[in-house]
Structures are given as structure tokens and as C-alpha cells.
Amino acid sequence: MNNVADFIKVHMTNRRFKFNMEIKTPRARDLQIFEVRKLLAAGEFDQALSIAIKFVEQKTVHVLWYRLAAEAMTGLGRPLEALDILRDALERHQDDARLLRTARAIAFQHGCWAQALAFTEQILSSSPDDIKMVNFKLHTYLAMGRDDDVRTYALTNEPVHPGLQKAVNFEAWTGELRERAAPFVQSWEAALGMRSAPTTKISEQDFSPVTFIQYWSQGELPEDLSIIFNQWQKLAKELGLGEVNLFNKDSASAWIAEHAPEFSQAFASAFHYAMESDIFRIAYASRKPCLYVDSDAWPLPEAAEILRTAMRHGNTMLYFRAYRPWILNGLFLSYPTCNFIKLLVKQTRNLRFDGLPQNHTTIDAMFGPSRFNDVLKMLIKSSSNTSILQPEGVAGLSILRLDKSDVCFTHEAAVASVRPLFSLAYKTTEANWKTLGGRD
């Protein structure tokens, strides 16, 4: 067997008929829950759901079966059904914190702001000191455009929860950005505001194809990231883009040396995995049409249609956070002829790190998200005329029309969440871009 997923698939096939729907002891229940957890961990969402849903239908089972069924449905791109299951569970297990937290995460991840807010408030009603939920509530207010509520709620709770001023700063920063580069904020608002639009399927031949790339410096992906990679592989085939091209440090270095040598020195001197990835994605975009997606970004149900629409438009597509007008570089679609990419490349080619501190601030500013944000603001400033378009028939997408070329926008609750619902092991290691320990 080649991997854990193959082992589990064979293991579960052999044991398929040993599942007893009438659990008689806690140990038997725990063993069956463990089996379903293994399926979820291997990305076998269909099998996990088929088992979990049988227990859920009994109505009197342990609350965890509802969560397992909801997680499996989310993995299959059926978040609204997952939320229905959790609401049904909450009718029987009122105020269960685990159900509420799972429901809140799914709702926010998929742009269901009102539901996310309701679940968050329900959690806070019994756990008012939960600072994480307090911040989630503020983030939801920001995503909903409820700026007055942000200020009122944060300042009211500041004596109890020091540090909430950060959310107020987000709101103030957005206001300042609106004054300096209004189209930036308007593009974000338009993309968020289109979440409820009906989606119309686009012909697979009606767009300019790109190469789908990802990067993982160390070579073979960890098992949890492989689950996400396989989801993007399915989507790439659905889009007619073939295979996802996964580069590592050696293959990326060779590609840069051959095709974009002006980035070779920066790539060779990068002091963290994330910086290597940042440099490579810009180098690749400088030469070829591409779709880049971070290895931990989780595809959402509307991803295919959003990407088809952006490819049909044939311009750069950038990726916003949901709770602030801030561009992440963890997902973008680009063509070398687009003005955004040309300016990004002009600013970053031949950059050197000599004398700069080796920290996440340098990573962010040199080739990372801050650079993407600065380039967009420069393009807006240099354009004499700007307008915002909302393409019909697709949710979560807006278009900023500039003098010389357009820029499309989507966001983390439309095309891909920043991370999946399940935790990722590498986030606790030096592979995390905000962790700068020693390297092998």
C-alpha cells in the first residue's frame, strides 16, 4: 500500500459490515468513532458520511456523530447541509459548545455571516470570557460591514478583554484606506456583497487556461496537506487544467534558473520556506499564466465557477480577507501581460535581503502580502478613471476597472478558506511562516 489513505480504504472495506448501528457500550462507540475519524483524516469523506449519517438518523446517538457527519459534508462541498445537521443536533443538545463551535466555523468559512454571528453569540451567552469568540464576533461584524457595532462592542468589552482595540484599528484603517484608495475598499465590499448571487455555469472552453501551481519546499507533502492537495487536483481536472504542478525547493530553483534568472539570487538566499514560496510564485507569474494556491487553502463549493469567470475575463484575480480589505498572496490568478503582475515583477526582481532582519515582517514586506497590497494601491493611484463591476451569475467576485487593465477580486469565504476546518500539524513547526526557528 502506498499511503495511509490506501490502508484505511482497504481496512474499512474489510470491516464495512462490522459496524453495528446498535452501540451497546461506550467502548464500542469510541471504537466506531475512531474509525470514522480515520476516514476523515484520510480525506475519505464519502465513506465517513455514509457511516456517520446512519447514526445521526437514530436521533438518540452521541453528539459527536452530528459533528462527524457535518465535517464529512463540508469536505464534500455541502456546507449548507452540514449546518442543517448541526441545527438539528442543537435542538436535542441545546448550547452544546462543540456543536456551536463547529457550526460557527462552517458558517464563517462559507460566508454565511448572519448564521456565524448567531452561533458566536450563542457561545458567548454561556462563555462570555471566551476571548477567541469575542474576536470572532468582531471579525463577523467587520465582514458584514457593521462598523458601528465593531466600535461599540469592542470598546464596551475592552476593560474585560484587553487587546480588542485591534478590531477597532481594522475599522479605522479601512476608513483611512477608503480616503486614500477608495476603489480598493469598494472592490472588497463588492466581492463580499455578491455572496448571495445565483451562479451560472460557464462553458469550459470559454476562458484562457492557466497552469495550476503549488509549492512545498521540503518535497513530499505531509499527509494532512495531501488531503487538501487531492481536493485541488479534482478541481483542476474539473476546470480542464490538468494536474496541479507541485514544486519543491530543487524543482523551483531549476525552473527559476532557466526561465526567470533575475529571481535566482533572492530564491537562493531566502531564509524561510515561506519566502521561497513567495519568490517562486512571483517568478513563475512573471513568465506564464498561472493559478497559484497555498497548500493549506481549502476549496469552497463556488471555487470552480469563480475561477472559470476570472479566467474568461483574462486578467489578474486577487484574494481578500473576509473581515478587512487586505489582499492575501495565498491565492491568485495571473497573466504576465497584466499590469498588476508587471508592476509586481518590476518591484521584486533583483531584490536582496542583505542587512534585513530575518523575521516574518521581512517575509511579509519583501515578496509577501504587503507587497501585493502596495502594488494594487499604486495601480489605483496611477489610474485617472476607476469603476467597480459585479459580474452577473457568479457569487463572491468583483472587478476593478482601471485605465489600462482590470483586476478581479474574490475572498476567503467565496473561493477558498485560508485553512481547512481540521488542524494542520505543520502549523506548530518551523514550516509555519511566522515561526523562524533553525532549519535542517
Image (tube, rainbow, N blue to C red):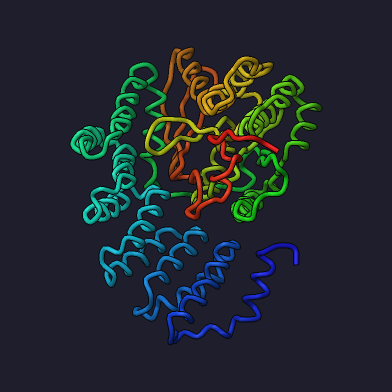
Q: Is residue 245 above or below residue 362?
A: below
Q: Residue furthest front?
A: 438
Residue 365 at x, y = what percent?
53, 22
Q: How far from the left and from the top, in percent, is residue 316?
A: 57, 30
Q: Quadrant of the C terminus?
A: top right
Q: Nearer the viewer, residue 177 or 41?
A: 41
- The one of 14 and 293 positioned closer to us in this rendering: 14
Say which residue appears at 32% left-offset and 31% top-offset: 166
Image point (49%, 20%), residue name:
374
Q: Is residue 102 above or below residue 318?
A: below
In the picture, residue 274 is in which quadrant?
Answer: top right
Measured from the top left, where is residue 433 in percent x and y? 56, 35
* In-image side of 88 versus 246 (left or right): left
The residue depicted at 75 percent of the width and 63 percent of the height is: 2
Q: In the image, is 198 to the left or to the right of 436?
A: left
The answer to whether residue 275 shows anywhere in this view is: yes
Residue ID at (22%, 39%): 160
Q: How many marks?
A: 0
Q: As rendered, which of 255 and 377 lies closer to the eye? A: 255
Q: Position of residue 257 (x, y in %)?
A: 79, 26
